[in-house]
Image (cartoon, grey):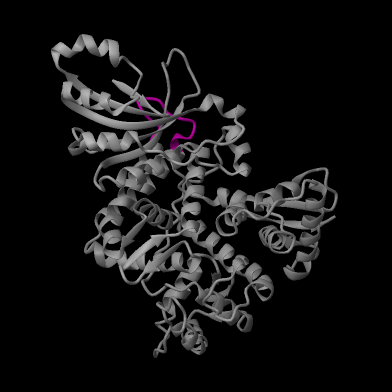
Amino acid sequence: MIFEFSEYHYTFTFDIKDDFEEEIDEDFYSYNTLDDTSKIERLLDEISEFTSFEIKGYEYLGWREDLTEGKSITNEMYSLIKQINLYGKNAIQNHYTDIKYGDAMCPDAGNYMFSIEISEKFWWDVEFAKHIVKIKIDSIVVPEFYTIFFRKNQPIKDDKSLPILSTNTKVRRLGYFKILSLFLDENKQIPTSNINKRFETFCLKYKDVLDNSEFNKGLIKETKNGISAKPYLEMAIDIELLNKINNILYVGKSLKVYQALKNDYSKSSNIFELTTFDKMYFLECILRYDYFYFSNLLELIYIEGKATYSKIVSEFQSKLIKSLEEYKKQNQYSFQGYKSPTYNSDRKVVSKLDIILNRIRKWEKAEVYLEHLIMPRLNWMLDFGIISFDNSKNEYNIEKIGDNLFKHLCIWNDINTEKIISPSKFLDNFMIHLFDDCFNNNIVSNPDDIKSILDRIYKHIENSFEIFKTLAPNRVTASQAANYTKYKLYMDDKIKVGYSFILNKLSEKEQDKFIFKYQEQYQDGYIQIK
């Protein structure tokens, strides 16, 4: 039996007493509105046995093309979860999103839905029932720049490769990557055999600066062989700040863009304090290369609101396992002899997920291993201002920036109607918009005149030819030129456009200034001046 309260469906499955069967047809038939709490008490009095209890919300996908604004099912689910947890932390057994279709004989667009399964010990709790039907959640405002993607009702490409960084607990301060960019100004190429010690020595002059910083963990200190700097350099390679070719390390394509802009946007009295540009650049790096661990940790803290380190450690492994199982489920499209058009790629995705899932399940002394995962990411979140730390209570607290960031990641799931595995294309489309909304309260408003935006894009692209020269004349690497342009547009011109928008405009036949060629084998391309 399903009961409707407000805009959500409270689904009870139960057996009723025989003498109540006739009354239920009159007062509680099919979809019924629970308009007062006395009906809850009356209903519970007459139920002989519960078999399930879920709370559900729906969006009919057939209506998307007519939307004036997006609807975020995932945000609604998590807002309800937070409110339910105020009554009992163990009240929720499971939660997920899914698409439900109607009768196979009458095809429809399907309902995109969330489901929150309530733990059995709360099924008979009248006070709990009263609590949940009184829940009011604030309207979830989906930023306007997402609306067109909801209207299209087409998923943004997700290549399903799981972004994971293998980190050491030492790597806690993102400011050391700012120092790395300074080090590389003086050392264009460095043998792998001695970079650890050379970079470690370079960092020693910043020891006092870190000691006097608000967040001062993760110090690089002097050792005989440079072992203190090694974890930072390993991560720099993993996030492609450094490129390794024949045992020589070079500045990565992305970091060259950062180096070209750091003198204008990265200077601060304390190198470990991130500027606006630093936060924008490094947050994109973290989301692109560590989305799985970072987003799951953010979700855990978002739901709790505040949590101790021991609380996070106790739940994080099971949280990762649950997420991987959800990923597997949404990519298992082969059933009853049916194979989807992407069956082979889906099978490869599931196989790779299985390998990671089995590895995480077999972690020995998980609490020791988890320190290397959790402590770096908590500290990155502190550097970004996503969370704060209350020393008196030994608790990490979600901040407004963290709330907003999590809401954006939920919207990405809603656009694709499934959990995102690899966010690269979303970052290419939305990183600047996300950052402006989360970190600057959406202060930037683009000019209405598209020509003025295009003029600025073309100007910055043209300037990039002087900054990122290649061996080939009249040619620049597309990713460097486009990323340089998106940062200049936001920081100087107060215009927010995505990396994809810039490349799409360069691809249009109507523009007569540049030639853009994409090279699939390099996952990049080049731009030439016509």
Q: Position of residue 122 (x, y in %)?
A: 21, 37
Front-most of residues 59 and 388: 388
Q: Quadrant of the C terminus?
A: bottom right
Q: Residue at x 21, y 23 (%)?
A: 42
Q: How many marks?
A: 0
Look at the image and tell me whether residue 47 can be seen.
Answer: no
Q: Position of residue 407 (x, y in %)?
A: 48, 48
Q: Position of residue 202 (x, y in %)?
A: 52, 87
| Relative to 201, residue 8 above or below | above
Magenta residues span 332-344
The secondary structure that dominates the magenta segment is loop
Q: Quadrant of the N terminus?
A: top left
| Relative to 509, residue 167 above or below | below
| Relative to 284, residue 201 above or below | below
Look at the image and tell me whether residue 58 can be seen.
Answer: yes
Q: Residue at x 50, y 70 (%)?
A: 236
Q: Residue at x 54, y 51 (%)?
A: 424
Q: Residue at x 67, y 62 (%)?
A: 487
Q: Is residue 333 magenta?
A: yes
Q: Is residue 81 magenta?
A: no
Q: Position of residue 183 (x, y in %)?
A: 58, 82
